[in-house]
Amino acid sequence: YTPIDVIYRRIDDDYLDPLNFLPNSMLGVPGIMDVYRSGGITIANAPGTGIADDKALYSYMPDIIEFYTGQKPLLENVPTWRCSEKDQLDYVLEHLAELVVKEVHGSGGYGMLVGPAASKKEVEDFRAKLIGNASNYIAQPTLALSTVPIFTEKGLSPRHVDLRPFVLVSPDRIDITPGGLTRVAMTEGSLVVNSSQGGGTKDTWVLEE
């Protein structure tokens, strides 16, 4: 056998270990949580880290940073309205056609409304979803994403992009990797860059003097 030190997991917590979580899971490894608790293995994307996938958590980051560091954050958050709170929901409903609304547990660009690009019917249909299950959504202003040229059948054409940097944290230092993931929307005018929605990637260049 080959000793293993680190496992990178891509399955949900509930399916990770049938002896400790869902007993009918055929995806996980029986007993792996016992080995993990004893320190015999490191699980990247450790159990419980899925809380960071809740988009509502983002709106609390300035408070979290100040609580743990005693300092104000250096970078400002994108304004984020938690629809679970009535006064914020009222604002979102009033400005729905101007905002981007996302499911708190959504991913891949699904289950969202881009107000300025939506039809009146799509806005009203989404309004009904918000009223019916407000705590499931957050809203943000529509950002003006940068564009880069891509090759199309008709030649060069601009497409929207975003940049996802990667930051590594250890007990005594923080390193920002010299690169990142640049995602590009392949549909003209679209702000959705997710690969699951047909988005692509671009080389990411870091220029240093």
Image: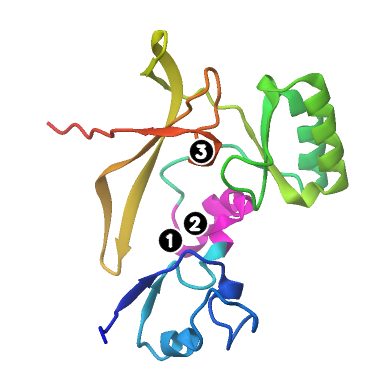
Do we see residue 174 in this rendering?
yes
Residue type at mark 3? Asn
The stretch in magenta equals: 51-71
Q: Which mark is residue 69?
A: 1
- Please determine whether, in this image, residue 112 is positioned above or below residue 68: above
Q: Are marks 1 and 2 in contact (CB under 8 Å)?
A: yes
Give the camera-side residue of 57 and 205. 205
- Could you tell me residue 107's position as x and y percent? 59, 47
The crowding category of the residue bearing disc 3, from other C-alpha atoms within 10 Å (few below 14, some 14 to 19, many at least 20), is: some
Horizontally, residue 157 falls left or right of residue 50, namely left
Q: Secondary structure at mark 3?
A: loop
Residue 85 visible in the shown view: no
Picture quadrant of residue 178 = top left
Q: Residue at x 53, y 76 (%)?
A: 16
What label does residue 66 carry, if any?
A: 2
Label 1: element kind: helix
Relative side of 54 to 159, left or right: right
Position of the N terminus by quadrant: bottom left
Label 2: state its secondary structure.
helix
> Observer-nearest residue: 148 or 135?
148
- Residue 144, compared with residue 181, is above or below; it is above
